Amino acid sequence: MTQILAADKAGVSHAAALLRSGAVVAFGTETVYGLGADATNAEAVAAIFHAKQRPRFNPLICHYGSARRAFEHVIADQRALRVAAAFWPGPLTLVLPRRPQCPVALLTGAGLDTLAVRVPRHALALALIEAVDRPIAAPSANRSGQVSPTSVRHVMDGLAGRIAAVLECGPCEVGIESTVLDLSGTVPVLLRPGGITAEDLQACLGPVGHTAVSGAAPRSPGLMLSHYAPRLPVRLNADTMADDEAVLAFGPPPPGGCCRFQLSASGDSIEAAARLFEGLRSLDADGARLGASRIAVMSIPKIGLGPAINDRLQRAAAPRTG
Ligand code: TXA
Ligand code: MG
């Protein structure tokens, strides 16, 4: 049962308590409804992907109550400070480098070194983020492949029974997603057109590049991201382990291997998703220290988040270019 929480103080504090406990809760912003979870809790973030039935882990936007809080977790340069002052709170998302001590779960950013951050312009969303007192990871609150919801009705049509609650926030004023601006490189790049126009950004920043595919139909920039790939080669569906292999285990591991990271001893795909990026990074580091020649990954059944985990592992195992 998905609870519909009223747009009042009690509704906000109930939603905040659910989020702090690791539950998934939808809430309205000025753009579209988001499917929120505590961005610092990897299992809660994995539950977002499970609820949406997303076939892959694309990076999610982290929502903050103020620019000051956002910039505690990412590194803001002069350009970021300028656009944040001009457009936040509002429908603009900035992609910036994570700070080394950033507490946001690696799964939230799909293992990338950058993080997408935004401060929404909706009184209830801001009240909710403040009450939770943690960043909220939130993709649009629809099932994968469906259109973004702009009312509680839409959210319930797609996700009723799959999430703990939705906070009634009224109809969304902007109705399209936030503009995604990548400021992690030397040239600002518009990754997704949205609520703030390219002209507005240019007036503030000067020239802004576009991704090759931007234009009439916004396509997912998630597909073009250069994803974190371990330095060690990756071998998939391993059922026996050599002594020079760093083992990414799922359930009881076979003997062998020079080091091991357990994704989920009980074979739970949500737990495994939550630990995936941490596992790849830690085996890469431990493996390098111990002279491992590769990472060997046990097979992961295609149930629950299994397909998304496999998608990510296949890309990690694909031949490298450059
Ligand atoms: O208006 C919005 O932005 C809504 C509300 C809920 O805030 N959220 C939303 O999230 O549209 P989502 O997950 O549906 O879209 C996030 C977009 C994706 O296109 C993703 O690829 C991009 O932001 N993105 C997130 N992190 C990124 C990163 N580190 N680098 C590049 N692109 C990133
Ligand atoms: Mg979406």
Image (cartoon, helix red, strand yellow):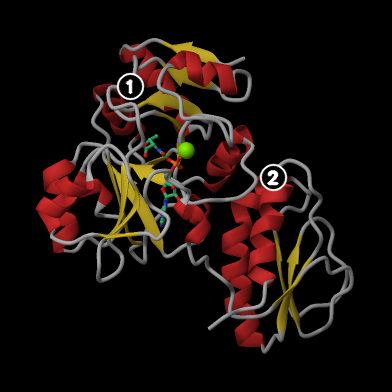
Find residue 32 and report its image quarter.
top left
Give the residue type that dot 2 points to.
Leu
- For the question of whether residue 90 can be seen, the reply is yes
Element carrying mark 2: loop
Element carrying mark 1: loop
Q: Nearer the viewer, residue 263 or 295?
A: 295
Find residue 72 and report its image quarter.
bottom left
For label 2, the residue is: 305
For label 1, the residue is: 172
Give the residue type that dot 1 points to.
Cys
In this view, which residue lies farthest toward the front? 216
Q: Nearer the viewer, residue 121 or 204?
A: 204
| Mark 2 or mark 1: whose residue is earlier in sequence | 1
In this view, which residue lies farthest toward the bottom? 291
Quarter of the rendered structure image containing ligand 1: top left
| Residue 53 in the image: above or below residue 164 | below
- The residue depicted at 61 percent of the width and 41 percent of the height is 54
- The residue depicted at 64 percent of the width and 59 percent of the height is 312
Q: Nearer the viewer, residue 20 or 117?
A: 117
